[in-house]
């Protein structure tokens, strides 16, 4: 097995790391992203380790980007009113009044240095040369706009103006409008039935679009490709899906449900369906504390101690051989597929959190028969796996995480992605909040073994990433 860094490099990294910790111990200042400006409050109001939401941030998001109680009293930068209050009484004979938030825009920028495992010459020849280290690599420059458009409408837009330092690589992330209390005329309680429309990350148990991790969850990036057969399904759950979603947060926000109908990853007439159901159990001892959004204690406001369990499923049909892309003269191949799994999230106040997820995927697979006159059933493409991650707050500004990723995919092994059917990686990391809106991050990935092309050797593409992430 190759060593990831030399002894000299290790000493340099250690020195840098100690320096970062000392820098992170400096006093904090107020953050200034869009919502912080609107309410004149710190980022820590909604985040324990941004972009991860705390209990209050979760309630704020569920309520259409508004404070869950007495929002009008807390707004310090009032919106522009589009119409008079009296127009409500004249509806439908007048346009229903609304509002525009004042410049609800924020920006996010990140860039990182890295140290890579030594690359075998055969890998460099096949995939291109990768330097052992870089001092700084631009990651993304993102513009974010979000807010409420009145008492029952909210919106979110985030766009990567550049990725990897290249403006040409930018693209739309989420861009949707959401109607909270969409069925209030039927006396449905507040936030029990909402509608979201546009492009969005699915209502996953754990977001990847706004994760605290520098690298993706392996199971979320897994797509289905057959080593033998026609299956080539590019769909990944965290992708930006286009469609409509119905969802709600009954039982005081402790129950969480959504049903989305999406266009899917490939052009076709049929639509895909995603379902998510979540239940949180509040483990606070005092009944009165369980009714509050956050709990007050000797050290101030903190999250509830709680346990959340989730179930989710995605079903779709992948269309192949359109316009004879695989075999001329044969029709379109329809290959149904599904993704399903469960998850949990345990929180102990603002000191410790443990969460995990398991997912199983299966795609129907077909292949050409011997005389290539028809498509016939072939061995299905399956995979399974998940992750387990722990987060610990040594101080409010110093947070450590440890993550395990595992994916079992026989097709990946046959295609040369990994040495074995199951690939594992271990990812320790540390986050330092230099300011509430400025974060220094370091993450090391101890990777699984990969085949070296054209040889019987294997290597680990392990990597250390460290850099800075800030919003303004």
Image (cartoon, rainbow, N blue to C red):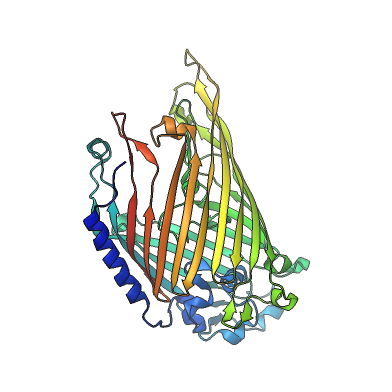
Residue found 53% across the figure and 84% down from its top: 78
* Image position of 390 (left or right of 414): right
Residue 28's image quarter? bottom left
* Image position of 470 (left or right of 393): left
Residue 431 higher or lower than 227, as above or below: below
The residue nearer to you, when weighing 73 against 443, is 443
- The percent position of residue 370, horizontal first and vertical second, equals 48, 13
Farthest-out residue, right: 187
* Image position of 5 (left or right of 182): left
- Which quadrant holds the N terminus? top left
Residue 234 higher or lower than 55, as above or below: above
The residue nearer to you, when weighing 334 against 92, is 334
The residue nearer to you, when weighing 410 against 140, is 410
- The percent position of residue 216, horizontal first and vertical second, equals 44, 52
**Numbered-mark total:** 0
Task: Let me know if residue 417 appears in the view.
Answer: yes
Task: Let me know if residue 255 appears in the view.
Answer: no
- The percent position of residue 142, horizontal first and vertical second, equals 38, 64
Farthest-out residue, top: 371
- The percent position of residue 112, horizontal first and vertical second, equals 31, 61
- Which quadrant holds the C terminus? bottom left
């Amino acid at each position: 097995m190759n060593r990831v860094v030399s002894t000299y490099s290790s000493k340099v990294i250690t020195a840098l790391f100690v320096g970062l910790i000392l820098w992170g111990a400096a006093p904090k200042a107020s953050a200034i992203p869009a919502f912080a400006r609107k309410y004149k409050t710190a980022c820590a109001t909604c985040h324990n380790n941004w972009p991860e939401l705390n209990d209050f941030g979760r309630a704020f998001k569920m309520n259409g980007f508004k404070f869950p109680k007495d929002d009008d009293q807390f707004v310090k930068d009032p919106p522009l009113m589009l119409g008079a209050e009296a127009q409500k009484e004249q509806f439908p004979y007048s346009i229903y009044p609304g509002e525009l938030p004042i410049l609800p825009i924020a920006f996010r920028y990140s860039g990182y240095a890295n140290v890579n495992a030594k690359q075998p010459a055969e890998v460099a020849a096949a995939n291109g040369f990768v330097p052992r280290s870089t001092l700084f690599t631009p990651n993304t420059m993102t513009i974010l706009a979000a807010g409420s458009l009145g008492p029952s409408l909210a919106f979110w837009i985030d766009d990567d103006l550049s990725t990897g330092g290249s403006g040409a690589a930018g693209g739309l992330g989420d861009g949707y409008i959401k109607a909270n209390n969409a069925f209030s005329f039927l006396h449905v309680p507040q936030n029990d039935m909402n509608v979201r429309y546009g492009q969005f990350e699915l209502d996953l148990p754990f977001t990847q679009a706004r994760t605290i991790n520098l690298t993706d969850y392996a199971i979320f990036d897994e797509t289905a490709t057959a080593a033998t057969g026609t299956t080539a399904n590019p769909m990944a759950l965290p992708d930006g899906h286009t469609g409509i979603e119905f969802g709600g947060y009954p039982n005081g926000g402790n129950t969480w449900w959504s049903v989305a109908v999406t266009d899917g990853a490939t052009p076709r007439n049929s639509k895909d369906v995603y379902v998510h159901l979540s239940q949180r159990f509040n483990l606070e001892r005092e009944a009165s504390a369980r009714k509050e959004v956050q709990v007050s204690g000797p050290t101030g406001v903190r999250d509830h101690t709680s346990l959340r369990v989730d179930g989710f499923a995605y079903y779709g049909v992948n269309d192949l051989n359109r316009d004879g892309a695989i075999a001329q003269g044969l029709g379109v191949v329809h290959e149904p597929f599904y993704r399903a799994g469960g998850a949990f999230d345990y929180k102990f106040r603002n000191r410790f959190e443990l969460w995990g997820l398991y997912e199983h995927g299966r795609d129907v697979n077909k292949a050409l028969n011997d005389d290539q006159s028809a498509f016939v059933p072939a061995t299905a493409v399956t995979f399974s796996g998940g992750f387990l991650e722990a987060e610990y707050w040594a101080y409010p500004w110093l947070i450590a995480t440890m993550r395990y990723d595992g994916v079992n995919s026989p097709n990946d092994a046959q295609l040369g992605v990994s040495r074995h059917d199951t690939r594992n990686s271990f990812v320790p990391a540390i986050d330092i909040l230099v300011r509430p809106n400025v974060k220094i991050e370091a993450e090391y990935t101890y990777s699984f073994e990969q085949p070296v092309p054209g040889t019987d050797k294997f290597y680990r593409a392990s990597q250390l990433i460290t850099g800075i992430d800030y919003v303004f």
